[in-house]
Image (tube, helix red, strand yellow):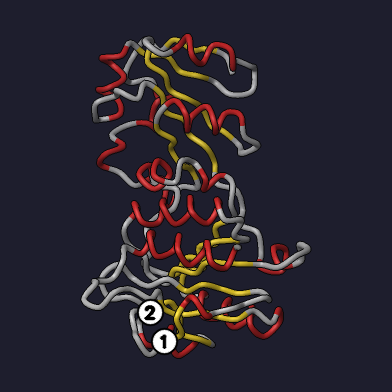
């Protein structure tokens, strides 16, 4: 990771870092951006393929011990770095990694032991996606499955909220194939599909047991799970709360459900 001093803002080697606030290159380019010291160092020390890192001269000493010949680290004067990325560069470091091919369900389910998975048909808020990924990693979830309309789990925002855990847990962006993947998990692996709902007639989480493989379906931030996802599921489960209490944030609810099923 040689240190490369950049003399011109027009240097094409900086293109992946330009105007990040105005672009969403990470969704379709096969790349992603880490923001800040902790996440960038985590990327550099991981086994993920890395394109490069960008560092302001104020923080170069913190990256110097990690310098190898594997990945270039571009260094700019701090004021110029802010002009490149398009926002206040107080974090001092950015990294650019390459997304790896997603594992298949067959590969994941072939691993020994009980499997607990999370499925999000349409979680649109990147903060919630990031929090769910972080919580799922913390409770040993096998994988997070994302349907069409979900926020990008490798966006700068989602990665920051997840504390980089998108690098530590398999994430499958299933898109329109999510129903087929869920049916495959039920049919071929005996997994139970559990729809999380706000409904007093659903099973109370206190009484729910799922000793085998199970998939937790989490609803949209505003509307919850659409009827078709509830109909697809084997059971409807709910968190018991005091009367008059509104629904919980989806990430908070995910933490409660996953603590129960991972225990």
In front: label 1 or label 2: 1
- Give the number of marks: 2
Q: Residue furthest left?
A: 244
Q: Is residue 117 left or right of residue 114?
A: left
Rendered position, 26 above or below 248: above
**Which residue is at the front of the view, 12 or 160?**
160
- Label 2 secondary element: loop
Q: Which residue is mark 1?
A: 202
Q: Relative to 56, is 133 above or below?
A: below
Question: How would you rate the neighbour count of disc 2 (Cα within 10 Å): few for under 14, some for 14-19, many for 20 or more?
Answer: many
Q: On the image, which quarter does residue 253 sit in?
A: bottom left
To which quarter of the image does residue 157 belong? Answer: top left
The residue where tag 2 is placed is: 197
What kind of element bears circle 1?
loop
Packing grade of label 1 (10 A; few <14, some 14-19, many >=20) is some
Question: Residue 202: x percent and y percent?
Answer: 41, 87
x then y, percent, for residue 190: 69, 82
Q: Quadrant of the C terminus?
A: bottom right
Residue 254 appears in which quarter of the rendering? bottom left
Residue at 52% x, 12% y is: 3
Determine which of the numbered discs, if any, sits on residue 230 in the image. none
The reply to whether callout 1 and callout 2 are in contact (CB within 8 Å) is yes
């Amino acid at each position: 990771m040689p240190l490369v001093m950049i003399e011109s803002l027009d240097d094409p080697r900086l293109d992946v870092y330009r105007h990040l606030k105005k672009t969403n290159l990470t969704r379709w380019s096969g790349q992603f951006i880490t923001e800040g010291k902790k996440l960038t160092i985590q990327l550099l020390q991981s086994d993920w393929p890395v394109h490069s890192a960008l560092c302001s001269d104020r923080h170069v000493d913190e990256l110097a011990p990690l310098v190898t010949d594997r990945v270039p680290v571009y260094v700019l004067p701090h004021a110029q770095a802010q002009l490149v990325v398009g926002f206040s560069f107080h974090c001092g470091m950015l990294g650019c990694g390459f997304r790896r091919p997603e594992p298949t369900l067959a590969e994941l389910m072939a691993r020994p032991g009980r499997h607990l998975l999370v499925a999000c048909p349409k979680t649109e808020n990147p903060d919630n996606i990031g929090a769910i990924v972080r919580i799922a990693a913390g409770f040993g979830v096998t994988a997070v499955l994302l349907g069409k309309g979900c926020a990008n789990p490798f966006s700068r925002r989602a990665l920051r909220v997840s504390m980089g855990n998108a690098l530590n847990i398999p994430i499958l962006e299933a898109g329109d194939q999510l129903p087929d993947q869920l049916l495959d998990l039920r049919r071929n692996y005996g997994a139970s599909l559990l729809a999380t709902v706000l409904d007093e007639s659903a099973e109370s989480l206190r009484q729910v047991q799922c000793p085998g493989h199970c998939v937790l379906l989490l609803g949209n931030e505003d509307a919850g799970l659409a009827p078709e996802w509830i109909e697809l599921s084997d059971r409807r489960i709910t968190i018991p709360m005091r009367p008059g209490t509104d629904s919980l944030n989806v990430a908070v609810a995910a933490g409660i459900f996953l603590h129960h099923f991972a225990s």
